[in-house]
Amino acid sequence: MALLANRRYLEMIRLVMFDLDGTLVDSSVDITNALNYAIEPYGLEKLSVGKTISLVGEGLTRLVEKILGKDNAEILPDALERFLHYYSGHLTDFTLPYPGVRKTLENLSAYRKAVISNKRESLSRRLLEDLDLLKYFDIILGSDSVEERKPSPKPILHILTALSLRSDEAVMVGDSNYDIEAGTAAGVRTVAVSYGYRNPSLLKAADCIIDSIGELIPKLKEFDAG
């Protein structure tokens, strides 16, 4: 009986890792504003929030690359510098946590928690601090924190090693196929959120899909129950 109880304890979820943009916070307006500032001198068409949402997920450099296209590759360094200059000063003009995020993080006090973002670590950390969310997390990783970013499993494996946890003790939560692919490759459970930046049809490989962050804790309990 004691052996069974110990085995059940070892199989329990102890770590929850979150994507940032599109999962914990809606930053789409601030990112769009920074992109439009970045491309303003070059005569390119202004971006809508919807267009921005369709392009985010692979990191800021890749985002600017996609907007400029191959024909404008030579202006990438200047456009990226303009983006970072503007965005670093306007991180949370309009960015807010999604409904229920703060309450959910408070109710996850028994779990270790981490953020894995394809946004640069310094920007991710500042954004969370500005929104008074940084205090909930043990580790923050950005696109420049380890040698590869999502969909590579390396950021997740880095956190598991840092916290001395196994893959079966962890869950990755995100709104993108990159989050799900990274989690699957690392061997952790995956929870997709349908309210973020990606069409839910791209998230079918996740272990489950939730429509609000408030549904996360019951799902974690389901995972523990087997």
Image (cartoon, helix red, strand yellow):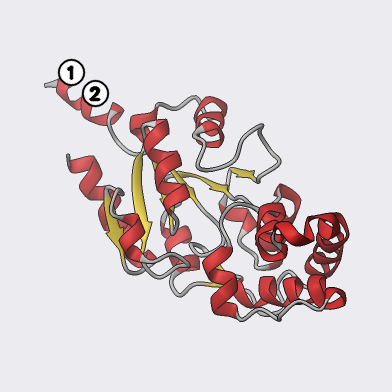
- Residue 223: % across, % down: 24, 44
Q: Is residue 165 above or below residue 31?
A: above
Question: Residue 75 or 136: which is nearer the viewer?
Answer: 75
Q: Quadrant of residue 125?
A: bottom right
Residue at 45% across, 75% down = 99
Q: Secondary structure at mark 1?
A: helix
Residue type pointed to by label 2: Asn
Closer to the camera, 217 or 123? 123
> Percent position (x, y) of residue 20?
56, 58
Q: What is the quadrant of residue 218 in the picture?
A: bottom left
Label 2 sits on residue: 6
The answer to whether residue 5 shows anywhere in this view is: yes
Which quarter shows the N terminus? top left
Locate residue 4 relative to residue 168 in the image: left or right: left
**What's the residue at 24%, 23% (across, down)?**
6
User: The residue tagged with tag 2: helix, strand or loop?
Assistant: helix
For the point 73% across and 71% down, which residue is it? 35
Q: Residues within 10 Å of mark 1 (few under 14, many from 20)?
A: few
**Image position, residue 176 (x, y; %):** 45, 56
Q: Which percent across, then down, holds residue 156? A: 50, 36
Outermost top residue: 3
Q: Nearer the viewer, residue 90 or 163?
A: 90
Determine whether label 2 and label 1 are within 8 Å by CB. yes
Q: Which residue is mark 1?
A: 3
160 in relation to 30, above or below: above
Which amino acid, by three-letter code, is at mark 1?
A: Leu
